[in-house]
Image (cartoon, grey):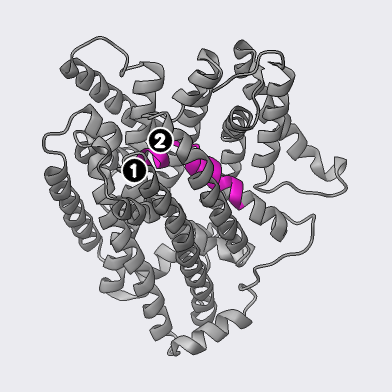
Amino acid sequence: MNPQLILFSFLIYTFLLFVVSWFTSRKSDNDSFFVGNRKSPWYVVAYGMVGASLSGVTFISVPGWVGDTQFSYMMVVLGYVLGYITIATVLLPMYYRLKLTSIYTYLDQRFGFWSHKTGAFYFLLSRVIGASFRMFLVVNVLQIFVFDTYNIPFALTVIIFMLLILLYTFKGGIKTIVWTDSLQTTFMLFAVVFSIVIIVQHLDLSFGDMTRKVIDSKYSQIIFTGWQDTRFFVKQFLSGAFIAIVMTGLDQDMMQKNLSCKTLPDAQKNMISLGFVLVFVNFLFLFLGAILFIYAESTVVAIPDLTDNLFPTIALKHFGAVAGIVFIIGLISAAYSSADSALTALTTSFSIDFLRLEERSISESKKIRIRKIVHLSVAALLILVIIGFRAINNQAVISKLFTIAGYTYGPLLGLYAFGLFSKRIVVDKWVPIIALLSPIICYIVSENSIYWLNGYRFGFELLILNGMITYFGLFIMSNSKNLTKR
């Protein structure tokens, strides 16, 4: 596909986002930036969160991952539903009752200063790494198919991409993102459906024939019953539930959108409906992955060593200009929908949790100025991490993302579980040490599990182990004599 055409599509779509940003960011203040003045329609938030939950990782990495893991990811997705129901019934009521802007201020109220900072730190670490993974995936595709043609270095491509996101989120924040996410979700889903239709046409099959071909292929297996396998269906389901809880319910990025809804029932409707919609949407991505591999085998297309590149390679080199444009728009939509909200959430968390911007006795104009400085600083940090990540990318990004999440979100899981389900008082100063030791212990166990646990290999359920170790550590360093009433 012509690089100029890809670049033109990229610029037109970006311009459209700036138009939406202009309309939504007028008369914005810090309350608009952080929680959208708590006036966001729940159905708009729910629809937009589909795109934010999927991101560029799902758009590219899930179809490519089918080659190694078949449809086993569906068990993770089914686990999401349980996780989202838990968020709606346990976490959201607490967040709304306490009227939180940053969800990590709960840890300050429940445990104390050091617990608060520990939780916020792990979110910042998790989201910086996760957002960088997601953005790298998309920027790398643009680099290979567009910017390499103009001899533009990868670092400059990253800076351009981040600068555009920075500009359209700079003023409106979450108030803008709620609406841009809806636009991005539309384009991303259209791109997936369109790609499936194009491949079916190129193989000269009916949709029914293609469906039967996928079912009969080696790619369609969902349930793996070997308990030692990382794809064991029980592990996948439970991992999915806890991944949803920590990467959505304990994540400022995702919860910030929910907290912008007018009422708790609206936020709960948003969360539960999102869980069921994601089952269908993720199945579409897996189906797309299967037919991409079938197409490659039928037409002798070389499957890349890094299977994340299979979808962009076929879409941009084999299906013509229209399919290429649709793919690029879908890809950019997926990238923007996760990157813009991550940038905003990181800014919010650092401003509220570390700078305590809401509590400072300074003018509103000075608070806005500080928030903008933080926004710029976070963007600069993400640029550096994305550039560094390019040197180590050698496997499916979604696999890396969930593995890292097991280490960085585990302490958050343990902290919130202990806060919600125990009334014991924790010795606050020990919390950072416990949260540091837990991932280290998990890493040691994971590296030696084959020898220690009769061949058992940890998958994404490492997150659960991490949370349990943190919970146990908090229990040891807690006091049963003084029960909290919080």
**Front residue of 99 and 291:** 99
Q: Is any part of residue 65 visible from this angle?
A: yes
Viewer-proximal residue, 374 or 356? 356
* Figure quadrant of the N terminus: bottom left
| Residue 172 is a magenta residue | no
Q: Is residue 471 above or below residue 188?
A: above
For disc 1, the marked residue is 263
- Quarter holding the C terminus is top right
Is 244 covered by the magenta stretch?
A: yes
User: What residue is drawn where x is 27% and y is 50%?
Assistant: 41
Residue 240, how many percent across, how many down? 60, 52
> Do residues under tags 1 and 2 come within 8 Å of each other at their CB atoms?
yes
> What segment carries the magenta color?
240-258
Which corner quadrant of the image does residue 326 belong to?
bottom left
The residues tagged by marks 1 and 2 sit, at their Cα atoms, a distance apart of 8 Å
Position of 429 with respect to 131 (left or right) is: right
Locate residue 275, reporting x and y percent.
Answer: 48, 57
Assign a secondary structure to mark 1. Answer: loop
Sequence-first tag of 1 and 2? 2
In the image, is residue 189 above or below residue 183?
Answer: below
Three-letter amino acid code at disc 2? Tyr
Quarter of the image where one finds residue 473: top right
Q: Residue furthest front?
A: 485
